[in-house]
Structures are given as structure tokens and as C-alpha cells.
Amino acid sequence: MKTEQLSHETTLTEAALLPFVLVCDGLNSPANAGSLFRLSDALGISHIYFCNSSINFDSTRLKRTARSSEKSIAFSEIEKTTELITDLNTEGYTVLGLELTTTSQPLENFAAHNFEKIALVLGNERHGISEAILNAINHTIHIPMRGKNSSMNVTQAAAIAAYQLINSPKYGK
């Protein structure tokens, strides 16, 4: 049997959104925002919160990168990130910061926890998650790196973390 590439045009029915949200602390790149819309669409992430950002949501770069997913993924622009985190905790979300810190745990050790709702906090492209937000979240996790660089692009890191957390055997149970 010959292998043929399938069309990239989706005919799948709309899947249910997961109790999983992204909280972007100071994210500023339209390309990264577009990638996060596309990631959210692919994985069933229900909402993106852009906190303290200056993203132009009409940017051609954002729209080109998002490939129209910015039209179907719910998002909000928020000024008071700590209040959002408090609200998410009240709604039953476990708030995880994706950041290398003195207390962060490797992602693979955290993915097996029994969380029903997850809010994954992502930091600024250059400076990461702000100290005020790090102090407000429940836990910090990191992706162990094998190379000499201590970080990767925020959207690549978000994709790895979200995929592993969402596909954890105990997530949402």
C-alpha cells in the first residue's frame, strides 16, 4: 500500500474544549500569540488570557501564524494578573507556572497528578514569568533541557507542556 499525505483541510467535527487555559504574563510577540492560538485549537485549550501585553491582535503576522484559529479560540486581555490567578483558583484551576526556578519540578514528574482543571502560566519571551506572578501561582514546572541553552521559545515550551499535561492518564479524571 502506498502512503499518501492527507489533506490539511479538516473535516473533523468540533471537539469539546478542555478545562485547560493559558495565562500569558507579558507575552508581546504577535507571532508567538498566533502560535498559541493555533496550539490551543489543536489541543482543545479553552481560553487564552493575555496579561500585561501589548499585542496587536489585528497584526498580519499574528493572523498568518494563527491560520484563522484566532477567530475560534476564546481570549481575553487582562491587566491584573494576580486577580485572574485568584479567580482561576476559586474556579478550581490548578495554576502551574512553566518556568525554571529553585523550586520547579520537572514536567514529567508533574504530569501524573490528578488535576481536573489546569491553568498554564507562560512568561514574557525575554524575562519569563514575573516575580509577582511566580509568588501567586500554585506550582512551577520546567522542561529539563539537554543542551547548553537554558530555555526555548515560549510557544514550543507551551506545546510540550500542554501536550504532556493534557495527555496525562489522570488529567481531568
Image: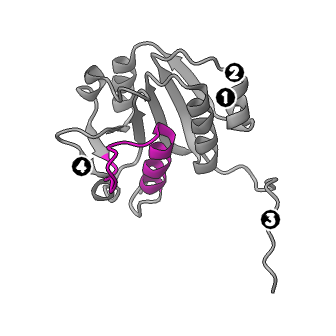
x%, y% of residue 117? 42, 43
Q: Please report whichever mark, 1 or 3, sits nearer to the chain's N-terminal start.
A: 3
Q: Is residue 153 left or right of residue 43?
A: left
Q: Please report whichever mark, 2 or 3, sits nearer to the chain's N-terminal start.
A: 3
Q: CA distance from mark 2 to mark 3?
A: 30 Å
> Which residue is disc 2 drawn over?
59
Characterize the local packing of mark 3: few (<14), some (14-19) or many (20 or more) Cα atoms within 10 angstroms: few
Is label 3 in a helix, a strand or a loop?
loop
**Do tag 1 and tag 2 residues touch (Cβ < 8 Å)?**
yes
Where residue 76 sits, quadrant-wise, is top right
> Which residue is disc 1 drawn over?
62
Q: CA distance from mark 4 to mark 1?
A: 32 Å
Asked whether 154 falls inside the magenta stretch, the response is: yes
> Which residue is disc 4 drawn over?
105
Q: Amino acid at mark 2?
A: Ser
> Which residue is disc 3 drawn over?
6
